[in-house]
Image: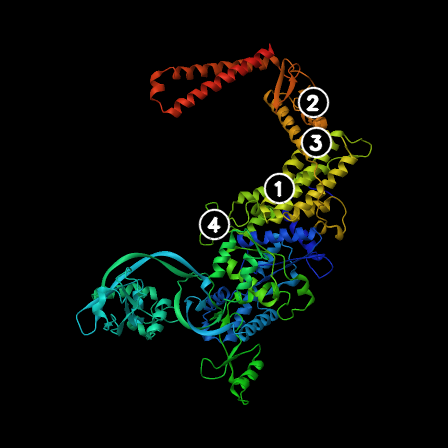
Amino acid sequence: MSIPSKYDARNVESKWYDYWMKHNYFHSKPDSREPYTIVIPPPNVTGVLHMGHMLNNTIQDVLIRRARLQGKNACWVPGTDHASIATEAKVVAKLKDQGIDKNDLTRDEFLKHAWDWTHEYGGVILDQLKKLGCSCDWERTKFTMDEDMSEAVIKVFVDLYNKGLIYRGYRMVNWDPEAKTTLSDEEVIYEEKQGNLYYLNYKIEGSDDTLTIATTRPETIFGDTAICINPNDERFTHLKGKKAIVPLCNRVIPIIEDDYVDVEFGTGCLKVTPAHDENDKMLGDKHNLEVVDIFNEDASLNSFGLHYEGKDRFVVRKEITKELEEKGFLIKTETHINKVGTSERTKAVIEPRLSDQWFLKMEELVKPAIKAVLETRDVKLFPKKFENTYRHWMENIRDWNISRQLYWGHQIPAYFYGDGKEDFVVAETIEDALELAKTKTSNSELQVSDLTQDQDALDTWFSSWLWPMSVFDGVRNPDNEEFKYYYPTNDLVTGPDILFFWVARMVIAGYEYTDERPFENVYLTGLVRDKQRRKMSKSLGNSPDALKLIEEFGADGVRVGLLLSSAAGNDLLFDEALCQQGKGFGNKVWSAFYLTTLWEVSQDIEQPNSSKVALEWYEAKFQKALIEIEDHFSKYRLSDALMSIYKLIFDDFCGWLLEIVKPAYGQPIDAVTYNKLISIFEENLKIMHPFMPFITEEIWQAMGERSPEEALIVAKWPEQKSVNEALITEFDFASQVVSGIRSVRKDKNIAFKDAIAFSVLNNEQIQPTFDEVIKKLGNLEEVAYVTEAVEGALTFRVKSNEYFIPMSGAIDVEAEINKLTEELNYTEGFLKSVQKKLSNERFVNNAPEQVVASEKKKEADALAKIETLKASLASLK
């Protein structure tokens, strides 16, 4: 087999991925081995690979490949999420381009378009993960809208409803006017924005008096149904029991009293709009106020908005401000900072809206999940700092709004049979619903055609919170062999931004349905940011094309580049230079392998002692690194684990060991050394493989004929053995000696091809273990031990040990004398200029203290250098 001198990832990666797939290395079946299970955080079915996916899935692949090498039954379940809001928005946009309005379609007609979209784009991101090297069990690929997955979701909904935990309520919800659906509280992002506070005058009915209110939303005056004052506010005693007139629409509304009103904010008078503010709704309920909803589902004004009907709320805000000012109702405007809720998905400004929705009671459900993470630590978060975030969310949890006004998703299994809002039953199928309805109504004449299923779909997270169970069919068939074998799973790798959306909810569902944790460890990655700490985004144009990175640097290079700077929980400041470093590391290892293929191996040569002791040293170094690596893995410090591997192989293996054992030019290498070196190289490849799977498999297979059972992907992780610390310490000292010799050679222009004499005054009582190594790497005639300093020799120190290289024959004495004399003359001239400055009293008295101190340091340094130069010259004469 011809080995190319340079590594080309493009010729290697698809070859080995196809090989792994062909031999089914990724697929797992229950057996007698210890299972190791990871479920992928399912990306959106319509998504494409971005830097966050790259980081997250690289980490998962590192963990799964290492588990496979450890002999565990590694199972990594891939899949995608149907992503109700995001996918429906894309389908709606596509239909709009074709001149089709969603509202003109039936549910079934729309769903056909949605499935067409899913089938066209749904596999893209999973195929891209293969380019990265992800060793998922592709035979197990799941989609949250698969028939069995959907059945599990509906089964859970019905179960929770029957337990009294799901209820239907008319509540103030977060309305996304762009997606035209409600959102849960956790899907709303609050941002501080600068707006205005508008001061409006309301006339008092039956008088010329007015009162002034301050509002940030003047367009909502059409929904005002009361003015509220604090009963203890003496400024407004005269208004008690009176009525006010709403500007423009002239609606007469009561002036009510409630100590909810903050007398210090605005004017102390509060306009009450029960349909468009949660706090106003509570006031409205308390005082039995009328509720006037002024918005359409897209946040344009309806008929209550009079001549503004059909216009967007923000357009109306501008126009109504002008009208109110022209008609004398607007007194003044002030700038005002307030928190504005925006949709996590569409970024649209959220509109509070009263609506019939489905809710899940969380107060009791959440308790086992709080205990598991914060008390018993059955579920561990890495880094631990996220426990505080988890605690805050879970201890302040509100009922979960689980219904969405969307077609794409799991349709809520509630069936209405009468005229009232309460005339419904909940069942897994319409046939079951019919039987329930007959029983509930005592009407045996009811038919399927009399039932109408709720049009809403379930929140996407309501399916993904079952993911670790449902991918193994654990909800429908909890006693099946696979579920009992693979569940609970081991590790979960995800971003902290979905710690509550997904992670916490999976823990809740796990304890509710299995009384077990769904996973043991949660590794929370940081966010990928650019060098300026900005979050990667399409709008900023700072998010590189993931596939182009792989094309340029190879998958291994990109994986290393991502992981070198991704400490757990800390944001990754991505720089393409890191991928170049990863590629460079691969090239270094390839060059090391290529070098070994150039050597002739001889059975007749005795192993040099330098090679023997160097191989023993590297084994000790490897074992010490292995302990570090295992410790880093146990703490999910994958970046540190990779760095330990990087330093071991780049510095110790390529930088030292190969240099020590390589034969002289044109000479063969002894078989004992060569075979041991290749064995060590194989161990290096094993610990590299989880991080750089392609190049390591390529080298492994190029080392000799291997059967499919002997592929690196299923090799055996190195065994931990005792560490010879003394050997490591002795080599560290010896390496400093070699560096000292090389520095002298470079400084004195002593050609490396020229062997030189060498003596050591061994004050440190260092063992001669690595003398042969020092001799070879320094090209020394010998390593002689002396009891006193050698006169007329070049010298350097390592700790208290002194090393001597006789100048006789080693250097051109005359040239060295001329060089040192020239340097001495220059330094003496420099000293005179500094001393002249310091002898000037005016300078010393007036210059800043640090400037004078700097000049004195220059004087001291020059004096010391002159003394050294004179001593060196004296030794040469």
Label 3, label 2: how many angstroms apart (C-alpha)? 14 Å
| Comparing labels 3 and 4, the label whose residue is closer to the camera | 3
Viewer-proximal residue among 6 and 822: 822
| Comparing labels 2 and 1, the label whose residue is closer to the camera | 1
Label 3, label 1: how many angstroms apart (C-alpha)? 22 Å
Label 4, label 1: how many angstroms apart (C-alpha)? 30 Å
Q: Residues within 10 Å of mark 1 (few under 14, many from 20)?
A: some
Q: Earlier in the sequence, mark 4 or mark 1?
A: 4
- Assign the N terminus to one quadrant of the image: top right
Which residue is pictured at 37% across the width and 71% down the height?
296
Task: Provide the residue designation for mark 1.
Answer: 644
Q: Where does the image place residue 644, in percent across and percent down from the top left?
A: 62, 41
Task: Provide the residue designation for mark 2.
Answer: 780
- The vertical placement of 448 against 145, above or below, is below
Label 2, label 1: how many angstroms apart (C-alpha)? 32 Å
| Comparing labels 3 and 1, the label whose residue is closer to the camera | 1
> Could you tell me which secondary element the residue under label 2 belongs to?
loop
Label 4, label 2: how many angstroms apart (C-alpha)? 54 Å
Label 3 close to label 1 by CB (< 8 Å): no
> Could you tell me which secondary element the residue under label 4 belongs to?
loop
Which numbered circle lies on residue 730?
none
Q: Earlier in the sequence, mark 2 or mark 1?
A: 1
